[in-house]
Amino acid sequence: NIHDSVEFLDVFIENIQGQLKTSVFRKPAAEPYILPYTSDHPRHIHSNTIQTALLRGVRLCSDVETFDQERLNIEIALLLNGYPPKFISHHFKQFFKNYNASPIYQDLHVETYQQLHLQLLNESLTTDQVPQKLE
């Protein structure tokens, strides 16, 4: 039997009327655990945690609506692990600013998201993350 969806590593892939849609996959029993803000790590480690989670979300979510849900999941996990709302907001804004993609953060701009999604997918295939400005 051929199924309409499959989980592979950390990607959920589904076939919706011939269109493949991807998103971040988590095991149902997984806790929303991220390095606690109160841990004895340098602050840049906490910043990197946010950037890495957002990079993963953009690379794995095939559309802006799915990414927005993932962004909310990331934000909730950060809050549950003691990250201050201002710290989260600052680093979310900084992430999109670094990629010249602020319209995604402000209003879920579809075209800007597709450009960023493809750019980060291509970067992950060639070299590791050096922010490039979108054109």
Image (cartoon, rainbow, N blue to C red):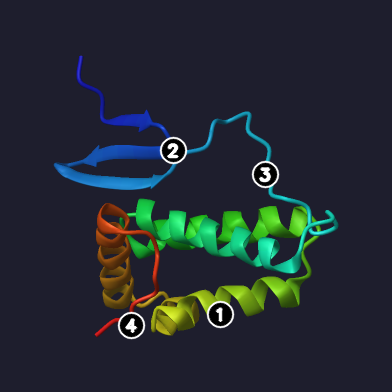
Q: Position of residue 84 (x, y in %)?
A: 78, 69
Q: Residues within 10 Å of mark 4 (few under 14, many from 20)?
A: few
Q: Mark 3 and mark 2: span between their CA atoms?
A: 14 Å
Tag 3 residue: 32
User: What is the distance, in whole Å, between disc 4 and disc 2 at their CAs?
Assistant: 27 Å
Quadrant (top left, top right, bottom left, bottom right) of the N terminus: top left
Q: CA distance from mark 4 to mark 3?
A: 31 Å
Q: Which residue is identified by label 2?
A: 10
Q: Is residue 79 left or right of residue 24?
A: right
In the rendered view, would you say 81 is above or below 33?
Answer: below
Callout 3, which amino acid? Pro
What's the amino acid at mark 1?
Lys
Q: Which residue in the protein does label 1 denote?
A: 93
Q: Is residue 12 above or below residue 51?
A: above
Tell me the quarter of the image containing the C terminus: bottom left
Mark 2 residue type: Asp
